[in-house]
Amino acid sequence: MAKIGTDINISLKLLNRSELVGIPTETVYGLAANAFDPVAVAKIFKVKDRPSFDPLIVHTSNLEKAKSFVDKIPEKAYKLARKFWPGPLTLIFNKKEIIPDLVTSGLDTVAVRVPNHPLTLQLLKSIDFPLAAPSANPFGYVSPTSAAHVNEQLGDKIKYVLDGGICSVGIESTILGFDGDEVVVYRLGGCKVEEIESLIGEITLKVNLSSNPEAPGMLESHYAPLTPIVIGNINELIKKHKHQNIGTISFKDEINGIDPEFQFILSKKGVIDEAATRLFTGLRELDALNLQLIVSEYVPDVGLGRAINDRLKRAEAKRN
Ligand code: AMP
Ligand code: MG
């Protein structure tokens, strides 16, 4: 098992030796390597069993620092970074040579983010290289929102997880790209579309389910537990699958006829942001119960609800 602790110096030493470290962010835990070091970055793909066509997000401590590895920052990006960084928003820029092709899967653009977590920001401020860090889970599985989640799945493959507690947002970052004057959403996530639009005006959504790696990260099946999951009207789905050993993930209501042990309620008060924080924990807990089926429902499709619903859809797509 990896060591879990809060020691920045241990993390630094490992990163300087081309090793990987689990790092906390406000979205999900990352599996970090020196983004300028192809040997270290290659280990990320190996440890996660991640296909090389799926590019990584590069983390840095501020936009000024990002200028050493990105080119041509659009005006709207400055505006977005000023308002949302540090925070759950990833921006896609043209990359400079110094970013290895492995990081971007050969694309000439690189995804960049300043995470909002005190420990990881402290780490980023103390190094002169950015950190390439995808979510710290085996490819395709549910992202980790605690150090224990990372250790459960990758603990025998990495040496250290920097423990920053439970992720406060709990869902991956929103990814935006720039196409001329147009701002495009490639992934719904922890930064709300409504807030982005109120800052820079209308943006274009390109987050359709697709199995086309040309639209990176938009793989149809992703974020999925091993147990099959179906999404819809929970009571109707329970009736339809009545002979199965079922667990439920509901938005705010208790479900009649299902043992409370097999139920996960995202937010008893019906608060969508709380539901986002708890979604991946719920998927993991039910996945550990050896159920035949998980039944869930969509949450209201506003704010972080849009990202939650996107993840549920992709989790369901795994089996269909
Ligand atoms: P993860 O860090 O596991 O959440 O995955 C990172 C995701 O960022 C990828 O799956 C892509 O969706 C996205 N991404 C990274 N780099 C790029 C890029 N240059 N262009 C578009 N999307 C990107
Ligand atoms: Mg991921």
Image: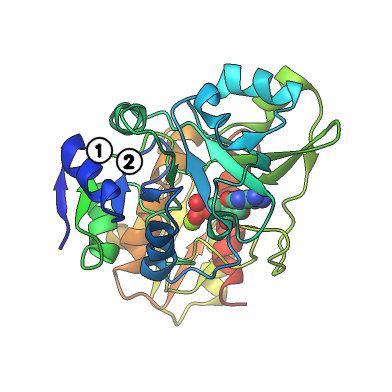
Q: Position of residue 317 (x, y in %)?
A: 61, 69
Specify whether 279 is left or right of 231. Answer: left
Q: Residue at x 69, y 51 (%)?
A: 108
Residue nearest the observer in this picture, 152 or 293 = 152
The image quarter containing residue 210 is: bottom right
The residue at 41%/49% (across/down) is 254
In this rendered view, identify the residue nearer to me: 300 or 145. 145
Q: Secondary structure at mark 2?
A: loop
Q: Earlier in the sequence, mark 1 or mark 2?
A: 2
Is 160 left, or right, of 302 in this rendering? left
The quadrant holding residue 199 is top right
Q: CA distance from mark 1 to mark 2?
A: 7 Å
Q: Are marks 1 and 2 in contact (CB under 8 Å)?
A: yes
| Position of the C terminus by quadrant | bottom right
Q: Is residue 120 above or below residue 15?
A: above
Label ID, residue 117? none
Task: Kindly tell me whether mark 1's CB lies below 8 Å from ligand 1.
Answer: no
The reply to whether residue 159 is in sight is: yes
Which of discs 1 and 2 lies nearer the camera? The answer is 2
Residue in view at x 40 percent, y 45 percent: 28
On the image, numbered disc 1 is attached to which residue?
165
Mark 1 residue crowding within 10 angstroms, few (<14) / some (14–19) / many (20+): some
Label 1 residue SS: loop
Residue position marked by numbered label 2 in the rendering: 24
